[in-house]
Each structure stands twice: as C-alpha cells, then as structure tokens.
Amino acid sequence: MAEDLQIVTGSKEDQYQALMPQLQGLLQGETDSIANLANVCAALKEQFGWLWVGFYLIKKNTAGADELVLGPFQGPVACTRIRFGKGVCGTSWKEGKTLIVPDVEKFPGHIACSSLSRSEIVIPLYDQENIWGVLDVDSRELDQFDATDQKYLEEIVSLLRP
Ligand code: SME
C-alpha cells in the first residue's frame, strides 16, 4: 500500500490543514505507539522541513527515577536523556504545558543538542491526566513557532497514545 505524503505549499495554516487528514489516515487503525510516533515525525519533517522533530518518552532510569528518553525522531543525532525540569523539554514536562521558545539562547538552561537550532516548541503528551512524553520541534530560524503551530501540534499529539 502506498503511503506517500502529499506535500503542499502555502501558509502555515494551509500546510497543517492539508496534513491533518493525512495524519489521521496514517494513524487510524494502528495501535503500535512507536510506529505512530515515527510516522508523525516523518510527516512533520517532510512537510515543514524543520531541523529536528522528535519525541522524548518518560521512562525509569536505573535509579528508579523518571526521565525523558529519546524516542522516534527525524533530524541530527540528539541527546538521549533529559531530567525533569531540565531544558525546554524537561520544563514543558514539569509545567505540563506547551512552551514556545523564539530564541533558544534566551531560554535559561536550554539543552543545545544541535548548534544549528535557533527556536523551538515543545508539546507535552497527555494520556488523560498523565504526561507520558513530549514532542520537541527545533528550527534553524529564529521565532519560527507561534499559536498556529501550538494549536495543530497539540491536536496532532492528542491522536497519540503511549
Ligand atoms: N533543546 C532541548 C533538548 C532536545 S534537542 O533540542 C533535540 C531542550 O532544551 O530540552
């Protein structure tokens, strides 16, 4: 079965509007979480061309503490573990909300996995009340993410389950 993504040009809104039904189609009927996370990364990377799109998932470390651990992603190699409250990802997890960072150099404690990253958005993944990971998107451009990205990316992650 062909799974080609139809890539569109136009405004950010236009691009998300075209992507949403395709993503719903890709995820529908598939219960494997890793497969779905992987396809969401690939689709977002293909449509928007961002530097890095990926998931960090909450897992226990050897000391029994919860940490964010690198999951499916598209882009350059990245740091594998992020602690609660650390960096943009760990802060989004701690605060339980989406964080938009227009200039990563101005975010205290930002973790620079790639020196090419200039702005970032992180969206927590909720399973009812519980956070089970985050979606992290990095751009080579300053001030790349806004309320439109927040709205659609939150909608996209609401389709995902651990
Ligand atoms: N910048 C993130 C770390 C993950 S990488 O960008 C892929 C942070 O500060 O949490």
Image: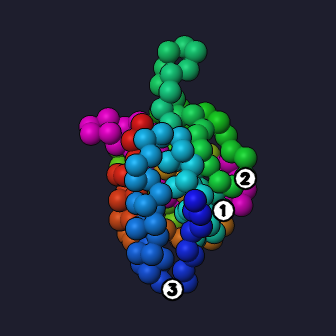
Tell me if label 2 and label 3 are in contact, CB under 8 Å. Answer: no
**Picture coordinates of residue 76 (x, y %)?**
73, 52
N-term mark: 2 or 3: 3
Q: Can residue 106 be seen in this view?
A: no
Tell me if label 1 and label 2 are in contact, CB under 8 Å. Answer: yes
Identity of the amino acid at label 3?
A: Gly
Indicate yes or no whether the magenta region holds residue 132.
yes
Location of residue 35 with respect to 61 vertically, above or below? below
**Picture coordinates of residue 44 (x, y %)?**
55, 63
Q: Name the residue under label 2.
A: 76
For label 3, the SS is loop
For label 1, the SS is loop
For label 2, the SS is loop
Residue 140 position by quadrant: bottom right
Quarter occupied by the C terminus = top left
N-term mark: 1 or 2: 1
Rendered residue at 41%/75% (across/down)? 17
Identity of the amino acid at label 2?
A: Pro
Q: Residue furthest bottom?
A: 10
Number of numbered discs:
3
> 129 or 95: nearer the eye?
129
The stretch of residues the image draws in magenta is: 112-134
* C-alpha separation, residue under disc 1 versus residue under disc 3: 19 Å
In this picture, residue 139 sits left or right of residue 68: right
Comparing labels 1 and 3, the label whose residue is closer to the camera: 3
Rendered residue at 59%/63% (across/down)? 2
Q: Name the residue under label 1.
A: 51
